[in-house]
Image (cartoon, helix red, strand yellow):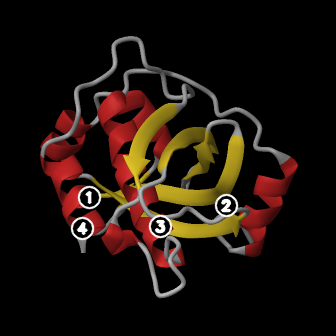
Amino acid sequence: MARMLQLTWSGLFPRKARPGQTLLDPSVTRMRVGLLDIDSYLHVNNGTYLQMMDVARNNQIADLGLFPVARQKGWAPVVAASTMKYRRSLQPFDRFEITTRILGWDERVFYMEQVFTRGDALYARGWVASRFLDRKGNRISPYDVVRDALGEDLASPELPADVAAWARAVDVSPRPVS
């Protein structure tokens, strides 16, 4: 429940845009494990990681200065697919960082990596396929977001092979025209 409140807060009252932040720059969110984040095994519940990632993606949108444009256009960010790999358990009161990076995009989604670390230690890594929807639920092309909202005319970097394979496996990558 606490992370849902944090997510709502980060969307309603986003942090300030970071001057000079570009689409391909990493965005860092610092957090601390709270008592409401843990399960009966006394570590962060797997579902809580996903809520923490939602907050970190809102912070990335804020860092880019995209919230005012998205609100004006009626766009909302949504997740199309995600996968996680857990390496270590976050414990109560641990401080940690989530680094969010856009790896690339196509006509359907943005591909992102979100990495949980404490110091130099990797705790978890997630891949997310994310998109924006308009008020009617129609998809907004990532190319339109990059051009219209960010004022940039960027080509997507080539996706890492493992991310491209994952995108095909979960059926979020562009489909061949038949």
Say what amino acid the circle numbered 1 marks: Leu
Instruction: Name which of mark 4 and mark 3 comes first in the sequence.
Output: 4
Badge 3 vs badge 2, beta-carbon distance below 8 Å: no
Instruction: Measure the C-alpha gap from mark 1 to mark 4.
Output: 9 Å
Asked if one can make out residue 18 in the rendered structure from this viewpoint, the answer is yes
Residue 176, relative to residue 163: is it above or below? below
Mark identifier at residue 128 = none
Residue 89, relative to residue 73: is it above or below? below
Provide the secondary structure element on which disc 3 rests. helix
The residue pinned by badge 2 equals 174
Q: Tell me which residue sits at (76%, 65%) in the image.
A: 166
Instruction: Measure the C-alpha gap from mark 3 to mark 2.
Output: 25 Å
Q: How many marks?
A: 4
| Location of residue 171 in the rendering, given as x and y in whole percent from the top left corner | 68, 73
Say what amino acid the circle numbered 2 marks: Pro
The residue pinned by badge 1 equals 7
Badge 1 vs badge 2, beta-carbon distance below 8 Å: no
Q: Tell me which residue sits at (77%, 37%) in the image.
A: 158
| Location of residue 42 in the rendering, given as x and y in whole percent from the top left corner | 50, 77
Q: Residue furthest bottom?
A: 40
Provide the secondary structure element on which disc 1 rests. helix
The residue pinned by badge 4 equals 2
Instruction: Name which of mark 2 and mark 4 comes first in the sequence.
Output: 4
Which numbered disc, 4 or 3, marks the residue closer to the eye?
4
Instruction: Measure the C-alpha gap from mark 4 to mark 3.
Output: 13 Å
Q: Residues within 10 Å of mark 2 (few under 14, many from 20)?
A: few
Provide the secondary structure element on which disc 2 rests. loop
Which one is nearer the viewer's eye here, 172 or 15? 15
